[in-house]
Amino acid sequence: MPRLNFTGRRRISKNHVTISVTGIGGIETFSAELELGSYGFPDSAAVIIEAFRQLELVRFEFGTVGNLTPPASCRLSEFGTLAGLRFRIKVVSTEEPRGQLLAVVDRITPRNAEQQSLSRVPLLAVRAQDLGREVWRLDFADEPMLLVNPRLVAKKQLVQSVEFQSLVLPEILRSILNRILLVEQIRIPDDSDEWTSRWLKFAESMPGVGTVPDIPDPDSDLDWIDSAISSFCRWRSVDQQFSGFWNAKSVPEESTG
């Protein structure tokens, strides 16, 4: 005899949910793929994703069933280490009875957790190296590596600074995608752990980017890269980061006259 659900709440199959966590430059974010069309929910029902670990919880609004829309930022920096992080999906009525929980799926383990153990393994490796008068350099001797001059700044301090994240990280991503598509001429991410696959999957996972163009064409490739950078900047609120530190720095001193 099937177990009865007296509240009328439905359970979403974990097979219809994919959560991916990716880190770049010390910033961890997540993306979500949800298949909710077969459940008969109202298009207006709100979709909420909660990231949690024990008593820590951060809520993200993902639009509605009929119009799934990721928020501008899916950063997970509030959690520090991501070990043990889990996700919960909720579908909530916006009509009467307003606020009723229509469905839930709980304790979702992010994809790639087994390989990365969610232990802050960065997509971009960072190493201290004397670079003369250069502050930093992107090295392609093997896979992409960010070199930081320890005589001038500690690597962790640099990559976690708002200035670096807003002014430099987008161009690092552009340089790496240019290298993959236009120099290495690789365009299909496979299931291997090759750095090219990991970076292409990262770019494709961002909202609105889509897959790499099938046919090699410099103009189409550059347009796709521009789209990836634009989504990256929206996803991490790069403009707000920049405005925050720039406006604070540019506040004019009060006149003493």
Image (cartoon, helix red, strand yellow):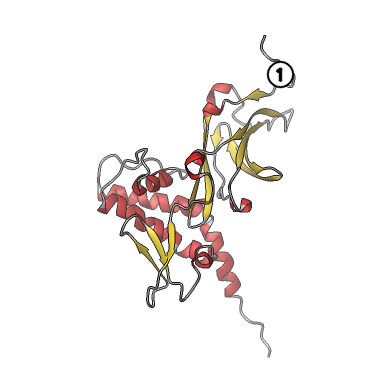
Mark 1 Cα shell of 10 Å, populated few (<14), some (14-19), many (≥20)? few
Q: Residue at x 54, y 55 (%)?
A: 237
Q: Residue at x 68, y 33 (%)?
A: 94
Residue 42, located in which quarter of the rendered image? top right
Q: Position of residue 54 (x, y in %)?
A: 69, 42
Question: For the residue marked with disc 1, what is the amino acid?
Answer: Asn
Q: Position of residue 83 (x, y in %)?
A: 58, 46
In the depicted structure, whether residue 141 falls above or below residue 10:
below
> In the visual, does 156 lie left or right of 180?
right
Q: Position of residue 174 (x, y in %)?
A: 37, 56
In the depicted structure, whether residue 99 falls above or below residue 189:
above
> In the visual, does 143 lie left or right of 41?
left
Task: State the residue in front, 29 or 143.
Answer: 143
Task: State the residue in front, 112 or 58.
Answer: 112
In the depicted structure, whether residue 115 falls above or below residue 257:
above
Q: Residue at x 29, y 39 (%)?
A: 214
Q: Secondary structure at mark 1?
A: loop
In the depicted structure, whether residue 125 falls above or below residue 193:
below
Task: State the residue in front, 68 or 192.
Answer: 192
The quadrant of the rendering that contains the N terminus is: top right
Residue 100, located in which quarter of the rendered image? top right
Residue projecting furthest to the bottom: 257
- Write down the residue under mark 1: 5
> In the visual, does 8 lie left or right of 240?
right
